[in-house]
Amino acid sequence: MSSSFCFSRSLSEDRPVAVLWSCQLGTGARSCVVKEDDDFLEHLVLLRTICLGADARDELHVVAVDSKNASGERRPVPIAALRSSLLPMISLRGLELVPPVTFVLQCGAGPVYLSGQRVTLEDDAVSEAHEEELSEEDVDEEDDDGAS
């Protein structure tokens, strides 16, 4: 089960830059796939938090990420080992993944909650056009001020 919530950090409302993302791993769903969008823009998945649910048993829970490596091979890599009595939660910084990416609960019954952001990097041409519009508006405003 995966869900997303829109959180716009762009100047323009029609182009969200960051979307909050979360999923739950457990006995019902051992994996969660974050798919890539077909919009020809670059996307990133920023994983921020992995935590055990309140009803998770005191056993080892291992979460792995399955994504293509530089050679194009898919191989799951463990990124977190949690246990409710020792380490029930971790916060991550700097873990940026390119979709499609699959998160897998390798061992443990869960529930394990993952959360982070899906980021769409703006197209440089669109960004430059938007900056030009803003600078033209600034010039127009200065001309209006000078005429007064």
Image: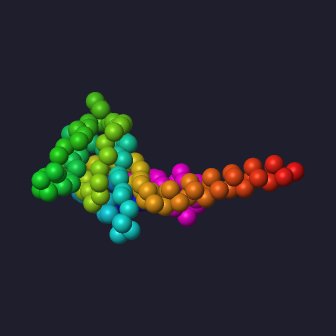
Left or right: 16 in relation to 24: right
Which residue is more in the foreground, 137 or 64?
137
Left or right: 97 in relation to 64: right
Residue 75: percent from left, percent from top: 13, 52
Q: Is residue 50 magenta?
A: no
Residue at screen point 19% across, 43% down: 78
Q: Is residue 21 magenta?
A: yes
Direction right: furthest residue? 148
User: In terms of secondary structure, what is the magenta stretch mainly?
Assistant: loop
Q: Magenta residues?
A: 7-22
Task: Kindly indicate the quadrant of the structure image that contains residue 23.
Answer: bottom left
**The N terminus lies in which quarter of the figure?**
bottom left
Direction bottom: furthest residue? 38
Residue 112: percent from left, percent from top: 31, 48
Residue 146 visible? The answer is yes
Residue 96: percent from left, percent from top: 32, 46
Which residue is more in the foreground, 142 or 47?
142
Residue at screen point 80% across, 54% down: 144
